[in-house]
Image: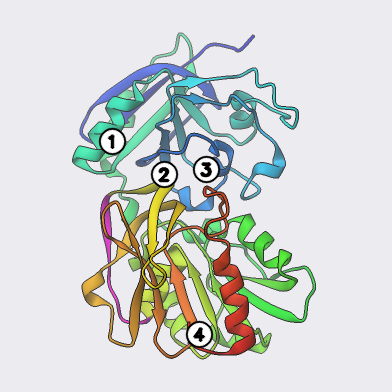
């Protein structure tokens, strides 16, 4: 029997929600965001792109198929807190080795359960993402409302260094192969590496602050700019290193797409409530085909600032934001969505094959 806990979620505008608590007793603050996926809650919890954020799942039932290490995108949980309508703590999936409460406790993260998540998501859609603070405490204890409101009001996601904690700290080599890929890790999801390994590539995973000179010394055949958390405008040093690598075939994913755009002279801006889910339609403007994509980002490239040497290759059909760019003469391209995820289920895997072909052919993207 679960030990009773209570939880309270306080938004920056002073709105407070009280409900049941599960997971670890803790007090944490972060940017409050929502994800519309009906499955993949463990992948979301372990996605480094959620560093610095409190996550709400719009799908009401979470935990029903349990947790397994093989479903994780990284070796830990990155969200600052978790908010759900209903939590199932008796999963029956044959691969499950844990339930939601234990998984969160093991990872020192707390969750609030029993919320009217729909009303909170509507607030975010109307007002935009906002900072919040979440406290999980033992039943019978009183929440520290003064501290929670202070944390919520003082939290500024754009000023948080999320990438340093999400990136690897040293070079890590994965697999073997004749084609060597330098993966610059801004908070890379594990399945990006899996997709490259499936294509018989050797992957050298570099920390986010690796210099262009360090990367060039390893003589890679191509470079992947990974996904990751935070405001791309904070990463000026990383953008400067990317500028020195534009003579290599490059593929950017999510944050890597934004940083590549910045290296090309484009600007980024913050979306009102971001794109987080596994059902976002994206059109490839070259083929006119539409893919169902997984997305997790709060910033986008400003279409008006993309230079003449580049073209927009993909558009989000929900709001017409830029979802992909490519250089007109060099083998360099990027996408805002996650081709390593499988919501379609395999609509976007061709992009890894395209990257491999660019490396072999040396032609423009």
The residue carrying mark 1 is 150
Is residue 146 in view?
Answer: no
Separation of residues labelled 3 and 2 (CA atoms) = 11 Å
Give the label, 1 or 3, closer to the camera: 3
* Mark 3 / mark 4, whichever is N-terminal: 3
The residue carrying mark 3 is 44
Image quadrant containing the N terminus: top right
Separation of residues labelled 1 and 2 (CA atoms) = 17 Å
Position of residue 266 in the picture relative to residue 74 (left or right): left
Give the label, 4 or 1, closer to the camera: 4
Assess disc 4: are there few (<14), some (14-19) or many (≥20) residues with their C-alpha within 10 Å of its C-alpha.
Answer: many
Query: Can you tell which quarter of the image residue 71 is in?
Result: top right
- Which residues fall within the magenta stretch? 264-272
Give the label, 3 or 2, closer to the camera: 3
Q: Is residue 315 above or below residue 137?
A: below
Assess disc 2: are there few (<14), some (14-19) or many (≥20) residues with their C-alpha within 10 Å of its C-alpha.
Answer: many
* Residue at 65% over, 84% down: 220
Task: Name the spot of residue 200 as percent of width and height, x first.
Answer: 75, 71
Please check the rendered image and state whether residue 128 is part of the magenta-colored stretch, yes or no. Answer: no
Query: Can you tell which quarter of the image residue 28 is in?
Result: top left
Separation of residues labelled 4 and 2 (CA atoms) = 34 Å
* In contact (CB < 8 Å): disc 3 and disc 4: no
The residue carrying mark 2 is 53
Task: Name the spot of residue 107 as percent of width and height, x first.
Answer: 61, 36
* Residue at 53% over, 52% down: 48
* Mark 4 / mark 2, whichever is N-terminal: 2
* Residue at 43% over, 91% down: 329
* In contact (CB < 8 Å): disc 4 and disc 1: no
């Amino acid at each position: 029997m679960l030990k009773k806990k209570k939880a309270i979620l306080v938004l920056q505008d002073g709105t407070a929600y009280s409900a049941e608590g599960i997971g670890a007793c803790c007090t944490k603050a972060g940017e409050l965001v929502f994800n519309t996926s009906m499955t993949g809650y463990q992948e979301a919890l372990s996605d480094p792109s959620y560093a610095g954020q409190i996550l709400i799942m719009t799908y009401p039932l979470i935990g029903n198929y349990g947790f397994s290490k093989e479903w994780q995108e990284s070796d830990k949980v990155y969200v600052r807190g978790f908010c759900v309508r209903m939590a199932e703590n008796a999963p029956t999936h044959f691969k499950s080795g844990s339930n939601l409460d234990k998984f969160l406790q093991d990872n020192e993260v707390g969750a609030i359960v029993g919320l009217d998540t729909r009303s909170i998501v509507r607030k975010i859609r109307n007002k935009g993402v906002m900072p919040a603070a979440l406290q999980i405490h033992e039943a019978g204890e009183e929440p520290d409302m003064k501290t929670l409101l202070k944390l919520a009001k003082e939290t500024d996601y754009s000023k948080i260094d999320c990438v340093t904690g999400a990136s690897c700290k040293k070079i890590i080599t994965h697999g073997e192969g004749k084609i060597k890929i330098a993966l610059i890790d801004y908070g890379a999801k594990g399945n990006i590496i899996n997709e490259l390994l499936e294509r018989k590539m050797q992957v050298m995973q570099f920390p986010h602050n690796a210099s262009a000179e360090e990367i060039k010394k390893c003589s890679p055949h191509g470079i992947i700019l990974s996904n990751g958390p935070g405001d791309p405008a904070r990463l000026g040093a990383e953008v400067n290193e990317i500028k020195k690598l534009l003579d290599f075939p490059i593929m950017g994913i999510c944050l890597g797409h934004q940083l590549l755009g910045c290296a090309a002279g484009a600007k980024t801006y913050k979306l009102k409530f971001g794109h987080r889910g596994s059902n976002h339609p994206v059109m490839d403007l070259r083929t006119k085909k539409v893919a169902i994509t997984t997305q997790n980002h709060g910033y986008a490239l400003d279409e008006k600032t993309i230079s003449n040497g580049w073209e927009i290759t993909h558009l989000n059909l929900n709001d017409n934001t830029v979802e992909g760019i490519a250089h007109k003469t060099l083998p360099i391209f990027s996408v805002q969505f996650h081709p390593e995820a499988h919501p379609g289920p395999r609509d976007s895997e061709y992009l890894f094959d395209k990257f491999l072909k660019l490396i072999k052919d040396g032609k423009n993207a």
